[in-house]
């Protein structure tokens, strides 16, 4: 009997040593797997909806504010740079600062909830949720108002040098070039908006995957640099540029900004985020997501 007990303890020690070695050789993951990310999207969407309206609207205002700061920084950082590649890189890095502030602070951005709310609808709830669509609309208005308020404060502060405004004009022309294409240009903006929010959806995807601040910032930067360099039309980002443009120059009118850019871009953003990110991954990882919920 003593021999059996000794043999049992020896086996237990071997198993413990093996487990300890395994824990050393195979450290825990420093990121979430895709099915966990999509499930987290749904949880975030539900969390946003459960907040009081005042909190929702204030967070939407904050997110719009960060878009104007990002727009300003993108122009300042790339100002005077002649080499196109470096120019796009610096401009994208500047705007990534705005998105990093949004993602990490929990602010509510229209183009982010184009991913979060569909994930909630597909995986957690149903499509007939009236409060969701009210939240969507109030977020859009809050983002636009927040962007405009910060643009007004920046103008009142007189902080920007006179060299900033010619650079701003170049950005505005780049965004509004589709006006020259008529009806075809309107649909070009819509398609460009699809691409933009596909990338921003992936920025949210990578940011959610990361489990530390460094990873979240890097995950945000890469898709944002790409959409800025490609001049893909992202409605929330354009709110920042257009708010400054509306206050600083009369080259374009408010209704041109809205009807010849923001409206088609927003429709495209909704399609890109909801279908190419949320629906695509929700369907691909459906069984894994259901397993997580058990």
Image (tube, rainbow, N blue to C red):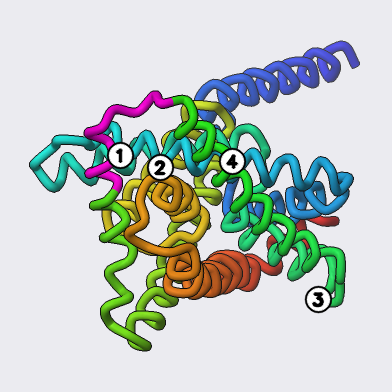
Which residue carries the number 3 mark?
127
Inter-mark Cα distance, 2 to 4: 14 Å
Query: Under tag 1, what secondary structure?
Result: helix
Q: Where is residue 148 in the image (x, y as percent from the top left)?
A: 55, 46
Image quadrant assignment for residue 52: top right
Indicate whether 7 appears above or below 103.
above
Q: Nearer the viewer, mark 2 or mark 3?
A: 2
Magenta stretch in the rendered image = 158-168
Which residue carries the number 4 mark?
149
Residue displayed at 49% across by 53% down: 239
Q: Quadrant of the C terminus?
A: bottom right
Residue displayed at 59% across by 53% down: 144
Indicate whether 140 appears above or below 48.
below
Inter-mark Cα distance, 4 to 3: 34 Å
Inter-mark Cα distance, 2 to 3: 34 Å
Inter-mark Cα distance, 1 to 3: 40 Å
Q: Which of marks 4 and 3 is in front?
A: 4
Residue displayed at 26% across by 32% down: 162
Task: Mark yes or no: residue 198 visible.
Answer: no
Which residue carries the number 1 mark?
75
Q: Do the residues labelled 2 and 1 touch (CB within 8 Å)?
A: yes
Q: Are marks 2 and 4 in contact (CB under 8 Å)?
A: no
């Amino acid at each position: 009997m003593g021999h059996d007990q000794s043999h049992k303890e020896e086996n237990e020690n071997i198993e413990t040593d093996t487990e300890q070695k395994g824990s050393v050789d195979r450290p825990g993951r420093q990121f979430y797997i895709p099915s966990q990310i999509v499930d987290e999207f749904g949880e975030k969407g539900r969390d946003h909806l459960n907040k009081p309206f005042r909190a929702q609207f204030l967070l939407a205002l904050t997110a719009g504010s960060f878009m104007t700061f990002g727009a300003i920084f993108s122009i300042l950082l790339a100002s005077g740079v002649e080499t196109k590649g470096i120019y796009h890189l610096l401009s994208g890095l500047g705007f990534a600062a705005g998105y990093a502030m949004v993602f990490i602070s929990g602010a509510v951005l229209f183009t982010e909830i184009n991913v979060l709310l569909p994930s909630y609808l597909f995986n957690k709830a149903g499509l007939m949720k009236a409060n969701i669509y009210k939240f969507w609309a109030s977020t859009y208005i809050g983002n636009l108002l927040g962007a405009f308020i910060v643009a007004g404060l920046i103008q009142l502060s007189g902080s920007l040098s006179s060299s900033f405004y010619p650079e701003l004009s170049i950005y505005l022309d780049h965004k509004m070039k589709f006006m020259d294409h008529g009806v075809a240009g309107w649909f070009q903006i819509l398609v460009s908006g699809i691409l933009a929010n596909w990338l921003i959806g992936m920025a949210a995807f990578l940011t959610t995957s990361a489990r530390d601040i460094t990873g979240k910032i890097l995950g945000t930067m890469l898709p944002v640099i790409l959409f800025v360099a490609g001049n893909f039309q992202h409605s929330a980002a354009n709110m920042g540029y257009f708010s400054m443009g509306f206050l600083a120059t009369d080259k374009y009118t408010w209704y041109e900004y809205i009807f010849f850019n923001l409206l088609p871009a927003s429709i495209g953003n909704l399609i890109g985020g909801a279908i190419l990110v949320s629906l695509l991954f929700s369907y691909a990882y459906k069984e894994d997501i259901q397993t997580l919920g058990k």
